[in-house]
Every structure is written in C-alpha cells, then in structure tokens.
Amino acid sequence: MNASELVSSTARQPRSAATDANHFVLTFENNRLASELFGQFDQNLKLLEQRLNIDARPRGNSVSISGDVVATNQARRALDSLYERLQKGGSVEASDVEGAIRMAQAADDQLSLPTLERKAKLSMAQISTRKKTIQARTPTQDAYMRALERAELVFGVGPAGTGKTYLACAHAAQLLERGAVDKIILTRPAVEAGERLGFLPGDMKEKVDPYLRPLYDALYDMIPADKVDRAITAGVIEIAPLAFMRGRTLQNAAIILDEAQNTTSMQMKMFLTRLGENGRMIITGDPSQVDLPRGVKSGLVEALQILKGVEGISVVRFKDTDVVRHPLVGRIVRAYDAQYAVHEESEEALDR
C-alpha cells in the first residue's frame, strides 16, 4: 500500500442497506499528491461514492471510507492505484478514476481465494512511449493490451469508444521505439459512411486523409508531431488505403487495419496474407457498423468465423461497458444495440 490504513473498532453505517459494513481511514504521505488524488472540490472522491455507493470523507491528506465491505475494499484498491500513478509523475482525471474503479471491481472476480485477507494490489497492463504512458481502464482493455504483447495477429472488435484503434496505435509506437519493428503501417478500407469524398480536391494523399485521420490523431498523441511527420516522410510510418497493400509482403512491421468491418471477403484475405517475417498485425473494427453495400458480406465477420481457434491469433471482444469516452456514449451504444435486436427479431418472425 502507498497509504497507511487505520481501521476503526466500530463500523459506521454504510450508505447502502448492506449489513456487512466496513470503515477505515487511508492516509497518504504526500499532501500535494493526496490533494490531486481527491480532485478539485473532492470530485474524484465524489465519483467513487457515486459508483461504489460508499461514503468517502476527506480530511487533510486522509480519507475516511465506509460502506459495504466489498465496495470499500474496491475503493481502497482504486485509490491506491491512482496514488501510485501520481507518484510516477502521471495525472488523475475523471476517466482515470472510472478506469481504476472498473479494474478494482474486476479484481474481485480474478482474485477469489478465501485465504486472502485482502485482494492483491491492482496490476493493470500499460503501454509506454517517451511521450505518454497509457494504463488499461477496463478489464477488456487489459486483456487486449496483454494480447498485443503475446500474439502476432490480434483482432480487437466491438463498439466505438472502447479504445481499440488508439491502443493499437500506441502499441505500434511502443514497438517502434523499442526497435522491435522497423516501421508502422496503418491502413483502412476507403469506404464512405454515407458521405462522398471522391470529388475532394488535391492529390491522392489529400483525398484519403479524411479516412485515415483517427490514425494520425492516435499517433500524434503517442509520438511528438515533428517526429511523426519526419517518420512519414522517411517511410518509417506509412498511412495508406487498404488497396495499396495488394502484392506486398510486410516484414519487420507493425501493421494496423482499422475499420475492418468495411473490408470485403477478398480484401480481408488479401490483407491477412501480407504478414511477413517479424510482422505484427492488429485488426480493429465494429461488426455492428458495416458500411458496405447491402448484400456484401463483411470480411471481418467472415474472418472471425473462419479463423476461430487458429494458433497464434488472439480475438478480444469489447462491449458497451468498455466504452471509455463520455459515459453517455456507452448508453447510446446500448440503446442502438437494443433497437437492432428488436429489429432482427421482427425480421426473423416475418421469415418464419
């Protein structure tokens, strides 16, 4: 623990109706870091209270926590993890608090030995470059980041806002900095999501940039902008439409295919067979957002079926609960999924 802990002899009544109550005080050594941990106007503690249904009352560099035993221990693990993050020079935003809470809750499922008096300290996967260090904010992100380290080919599939593409680009940047690969190749199928971009002015690069902008944004967040621009000019970082991959063998490279749900079957097979020696391939997409013409099967959906169980391939599936953007995004995803489910049931009933 990074904080000393004082447990009271009598348990305070928790906010919930649970009878299994718990109360303890955490004291953090560094007053400045404790203030950052609690947040401006104690907003981070208030978020813990809301999410875990506990009481968290700060006093100086200490916080008194009371409530259900499971919830209070989750709060302790979350605060300990966030304080350690601050000690390493990081910052703590509301999204980091949300992530620490999710990971603390997941730890209860992962560590269930009855002989353990308390759960072990949270160990979240992370990706580090010279510019930034990213920690997993959900159990699925944790699994995804660990899969990226282990497997040569990783599928990250699920709804928008779960960090699939961002973490893939971060991992590729980390591999490049380590010298594990010589280049990064980022690609997307050039399929419009209802728009028409073909008549935009400019050369080929300027025409395809709108499709690839999210990949640029993720790279700029991990590597200084001037280094990204120099690497693109030198060919160390290549960003191109999927069609440009045909006929190539991609060796010593981290290769990312984004928006893979918009590949056709032939495009996906073509891309998968580009993998060369010492290559690492990451494929991301959302099967629920296919923009292909009606009747054209998604190459991503087909590949997930065909490659199931193939050695060396890891598939990580994100859910709406893994959305790490604004909390409203998760609720939007759930609402749309529910509507699609009703629509599919209606179509199936008509077909009977």
Image (cartoon, helix red, strand yellow):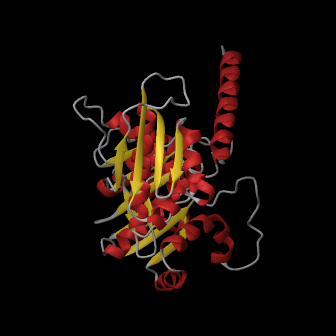
The image quadrant where one finds the C terminus is top right
Question: With respect to residue 103, does 209 lie above or below?
Answer: below
Image location (x, y in percent) of residue 311: 28, 45
Horizontally, residue 75 falls left or right of residue 108, namely: right
Furthest toward the top, the residue is: 352
Q: Name the residue nearer the viewer: 321 or 69.
A: 69
Residue 322 visible (yes or no): no
Residue 131 visible (yes or no): yes
Q: Name the residue nearer the viewer: 16 or 346.
A: 16
At x 72%, y 79%, the residue is 202
Q: Name the residue nearer the viewer: 341 or 25.
A: 25
At x 69%, y 57%, the residue is 192
Horizontally, residue 238 falls left or right of residue 279, namely: right
At x 26%, y 35%, the residue is 117
Horizontally, residue 349 falls left or right of residue 160, namely: right
Question: With respect to residue 324, does 349 lie above or below?
Answer: above
